């Protein structure tokens, strides 16, 4: 029997049904699946010194809703470090975030930031890293809390790609795609 003659199983993971992307974007990924991939990503090494980033935020409709560039600086003392970020959005808004990260020898890490509820938990293996956390996002006169799932992939040219899924009540409400590059200058300006 030719493989083309076999009956096909219906799978929401591989078919494009309305709403299916709400459920299956990251569900099939495991950081362990990237263990043999190169170049090896060590976030402590990559996020040490000055970096620049460019990114876009896609809303629920899939349209780009915000664009930004960022300057960052990472400083480390052993397995603990800080990453200062200064964002400049296309609409003129400027924002800052300072992460504190602590790594264990097995590649797991925890991270905190002022707008993160509790602690982020992550793991790095091979050329990838993943991190989950709850982020407080300003909205109107208040804020909402969204679940974040960040995936990082190191490319052979030194670019670090970040794809993040934002969810509320388990449903995708947005997606973020960011590219990072190490720079020789670019200290983060403080407010």
Image: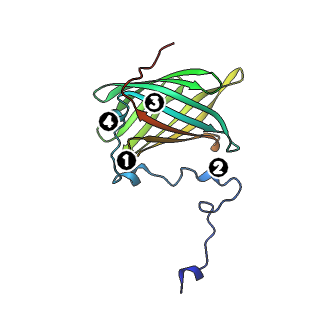
Q: Considering only vertical position in the picture, is 135 above or below 188?
A: below
Residue 52 disc label = 3
35 lies above or below 103:
below
Q: Position of residue 92 (x, y in %)?
A: 63, 22
- Please report whichever mark, 1 or 2, sits nearer to the chain's N-terminal start: 2
User: Mark 4 or mark 2, which is nearer the start of the sequence?
Assistant: 2
Q: Residue at x 54, y 84 (%)?
A: 2
| Residue that numbered label 1 is attached to | 156
Q: Which residue is mark 4?
A: 104
Q: Which colour assignment does the render follow?
A: rainbow
Secondary structure at badge 4 equals loop
Q: Earlier in the sequence, mark 4 or mark 3?
A: 3
Q: Residue at x 66, y 55 (%)?
A: 20
Query: What separation in Å lies between label 4 and label 3 (alpha carbons)?
Result: 26 Å
Callouts 4 and 3 close, C-beta under 8 Å: no
Q: Secondary structure at mark 3?
A: strand
Mark 3 or mark 2: which is in front? 3
């Amino acid at each position: 029997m030719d493989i083309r003659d076999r009956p096909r199983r219906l799978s929401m993971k591989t078919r494009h049904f309305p709403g299916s992307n709400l459920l299956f974007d990251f569900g099939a990924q495991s950081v362990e699946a990237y263990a043999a991939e190169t170049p090896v990503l060590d976030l402590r090494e990559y996020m040490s010194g000055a970096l620049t980033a460019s990114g876009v935020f896609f809303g629920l409709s899939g349209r780009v809703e915000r664009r930004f560039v960022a300057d960052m600086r990472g400083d480390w003392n052993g397995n603990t470090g800080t990453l200062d970020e200064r964002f400049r959005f296309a609409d003129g808004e400027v924002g800052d975030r300072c992460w504190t990260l602590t790594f264990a020898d097995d590649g797991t890490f925890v991270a905190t930031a002022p707008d993160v509820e509790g602690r982020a938990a992550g793991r790095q293996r091979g050329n990838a890293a993943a991190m989950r956390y709850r982020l407080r996002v300003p909205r109107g006169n208040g804020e909402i809390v969204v679940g974040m799932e960040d995936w990082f992939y190191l490319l052979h040219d030194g670019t670090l790609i970040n794809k993040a899924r934002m969810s509320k009540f388990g449903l995708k409400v947005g997606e973020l795609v960011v590219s990072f590059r190490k720079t020789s200058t670019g200290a983060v300006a403080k407010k």
